[in-house]
Amino acid sequence: MGVSMDKKQLVHKIIVMIFFILLMSPFLILLLWAFSKVWTAGSIFPHDWGLRGWQYILNPQNKILSVIGTSIFLSLAVTLVATIISIPAGKALGLYDFPGKNIVEILVLAPIIIPPITIGMGIHVIFIKYGLVDTFLGVLLIHLVVVMPYGIRIFASVYKAMGLKWEEQSKILKANNWQRFIYVTLPFLKPGLITSGILMFNVSFSQYFLTFLIGGGKIVTLPLVLFPYINSGDRVIGSVISLIFILIALIFMFIIERVITDPKQKSSYYYL
Amino acid sequence: MAKVILKNLVKYYSKEKVIKNLNIEIEHGEFVALVGPSGCGKTTTLKLLSGLLLPDQGQILLDKEEITFLPAEQRDIVMVFQDHLLFPHLSVAENVAFGLKMLGVSKKIRMEKAKALLELVHLPGIEQKYPGQLSGGQQQRVALARALALEPKVLLLDEPLSNLDPTLREEMRELILQIHRKLNMTTVFVTHDQNEAMLLADKIAVMLEGQILQYDTPYNLYNHPVNKKIASMFGVCNYLEGNIHNNNFFAKGKKISIPHFLDNGEFVACVRAEHIEICSPPQKECFSGVIEDKKFSAGQSIIKISTDLGLLTAVVKNHIDIELGSRMYFKIEWNRVWFQKRGESCEDFHHNSHLERGQQNITNIKNDKAACG
Amino acid sequence: MKYKPYLYLAPALLVLTIFFLGGLVFALLQSFGYFPVLGLTQFTLKYYLLVVKQKEFMASLTFTLYIAFVSTFLSTIIAIYLANYMVNLKQKNKVIDFMYKLPIAVPHIVAALMIVFLISQGGFLARIFINLGVINESGQFPPVFYSRNAIGIITIYMWKEIPFITLMIYTVMKNIHGKLNDVAATLKASPWQVFFQVTLPLSMPSIISASAIVFAFSFGAFEIPFLLGATYPKALPVWAYYNYISPDLYNRPIAMVITIILTSVCVMLVGLYYLFMKKYLRQWG
């Protein structure tokens, strides 16, 4: 019996290992491409290594750097605005019962379910009418719609787990509205801030269709630049842009966790 | 000085009336316990007092000044919750000093005060620890220190002992009492444990369904309860049904002469378990009964005796060895028994309205008369 | 006190109402032929009939459903297997933990690019096959992109979605397992029985919720079928887009009809999911 158990476990282990090799292999190919110089069709490995792709990216003439800048700035702005709007909305949904709550909950869930293409094509006319098309503001607003539901849902669950008791306790201890928010609520929201910040930044950062439609080619972000490389074009450059794309997402994740997490805290008390 | 008056308080939750015309007066320095089953409105009363909830009717006065609608953060009343609710992201000292920080007290004074208060609650030297590193009893004591830091006129305690294990509970109880005596602070304490209330409080308000049934000293609640409900809350009671005729109580064919004058009629005699004594050797007026059950505990045994009067519960001293199934003799201290007139309201123990009406139907028996044999 | 929640919600509701509901309503109006810019102000079902009658409609709908269903189904099964494997590990494997989360941070477009480099006819796999002598030239490698079997698109979605579903269900399964595994084991359940009798049914709500989100996403996604899909049939979002950008503005209502149908299917699915959840959760009181 012991032997058969071990055998079974070994089979599972091998299956999982193969799975992870498959899951990670695209990254390896990407790395190979990003640092290759010549890689002719038909050969398994590059003939020569080089930094051609990186040189192309760093050359200001190709405007990739400014695109990266725009992308980061846009997604940061979207994340910031969405966070500010989502916190009170999450509080309302997490802590209060009020007439119409069901409808609001559906409205908050809907943008996650309903395809962006529907919303984008529907609202396009209005954006044109009010001059929001081809503007940074227009893209920011449409990104907000896609990103906010995640934030609201996360903050609602944090507030729900937190309950009213902490606010009551701080009220008893003479804290006024702002003091309550800064000294008590905010520390409790930290894990929610991390999760929602990463999620919202990522969703905005990888958004293609809405940026393309509303930005009209004037607001150029990384996904727009990368788009043509998927089925044609220089694979080396495409790989480098992809790599930068992934790196920025990971760095943002790392920074936000560092900035928000307080190393002094020893106990893990959060709702998680 | 801090005298608190709650006048005709009414509070609704959505449409349900959870506090129905509540009146209490608390003198300066008094320790008052609110006792009652869960859902009776104790905690709501405390929250009304603290300002976390606002009443729909009525007034709250603190030293003759009306504070009914004053926001919680502006009242000189501080509350300690059932869960300690220490802020997990702040150190113990920062927790204790939190209220002072909110009031803009300078850091130096804050920290000095936190240190002094932690000493007061017997927790010196833990300023830099975090709440997550403390035991349950320590957390609750820090919560108490945090409340005291604001030097409130009134201290409210919402079941601060209920999450502690028995030994810690006793320690904490002593600490609360000690601090109360030291600071002479008006204190309101909520509990569902009547023993705890009796041990701690100067006065106890017994609450049920949003109303106060009796507001009195522990002595009076035990000796002069206004109805059966309260009698049973503060001790074990046996109820004997019978008739009174010419100052004799007739029950189950027995005739007992009672030491006080009562009208003729149908009565229930309420006999406390501790007022049944074992007679050895047996005397003339003793009943006999068979021991059906016994529970031995430190200090006293609780026994059930099957007698002609029915099954009775008695609390007896431990120095007599009682054997199950043996027949023993006992007597009732009739001068400490009180009688309640039987009416529809008393018959039905679970009938809601019997409590209000019970007050008129009850006849207390003063026990200052001569004891009978 | 009463108005407080509304005040808190006001900014969010403002944005969602104007830009989200607004977009939805305008799409709906245009699908019914209300398009004042073109002088069309009559409500009509003409465009719906026009779309439904086209041969491409059924083909397109089936194709889109096929991609969404196959990728979601396979992703869910594999994610459950993976999550269960991780739950049963004696201690948390940090390498696995890091690796499986990595694709979540990768945008779909980047994922598409990487998978293309891997399994397209000019990709890494084809090169290995050529060098092994299995095939002579890259053209002999089975086409997975621009093809009606959509294997390439499904692979891209699976690469992104397996980690996502795993993340969503792992914590839930871990909690259930931690609480009930020992109990079930003392009641003589084998590890497989514990999984099928206890862990799986109890984590069903989160499994269904995760796969519903994934289904809705892959059903409505535009970029990848646009870049890598077959010319015929097109996925619904792609078909809608081509109608939308057509120089003939009278094709706009048709585009809207397609997106409205797309949306309705998504909404219906989520509605079903809610009903199912309600029933499922009610069983347990």
Image (cartoon, coloured by chain):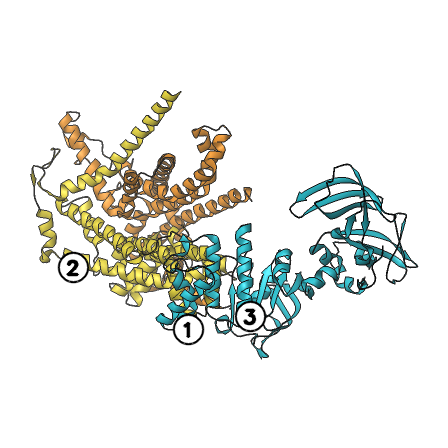
- Does residue C59 appear to the left or right of A239 in the view shown? right
Provide residue B9's location: percent of width, then percent of height. 63, 70
Provide residue B55's location: percent of width, then percent of height. 59, 70
Q: Residue furthest right?
A: B246
Q: Amino acid at mark 1?
A: Leu
- Name the image quarter holding residue A89: bottom left
Disc assigned to residue B241: none
Q: Is residue B47 above or below residue B334?
A: below
- Name the image quarter holding residue A64: bottom left
Q: CA distance from mark 1 to mark 3?
A: 24 Å
Q: Amino acid at mark 3?
A: Asn
Q: Write down the residue under mark 3.
A: B184
- Does residue A101 appear to the left or right of B231 in the view shown? left
**Residues tagged 1 and 3 counted as in contact (Cβ below 8 A):** no
The numbered mark, 1 or 3, whose residue comes first in the sequence reads 1
Query: Label 1: how many residues lie within 10 Å, few (<14), some (14-19) or many (20+)?
Result: some
> Who is closer to the viewer here, B268 or C277?
B268
> Who is closer to the viewer here, B172 or C37?
B172
Q: Write down the residue under mark 1.
A: B103
Mark 1 residue element: loop
Asked if residue A59 shows in the view, the reply is yes
Q: Is residue B179 above or below residue A195?
A: below
Quarter of the image that includes the C terminus of chain C: top right
Chain B representation colour: cyan
Chain A representation colour: yellow
Disc assigned to residue A66: 2
- Name the image quarter holding residue C173: top left
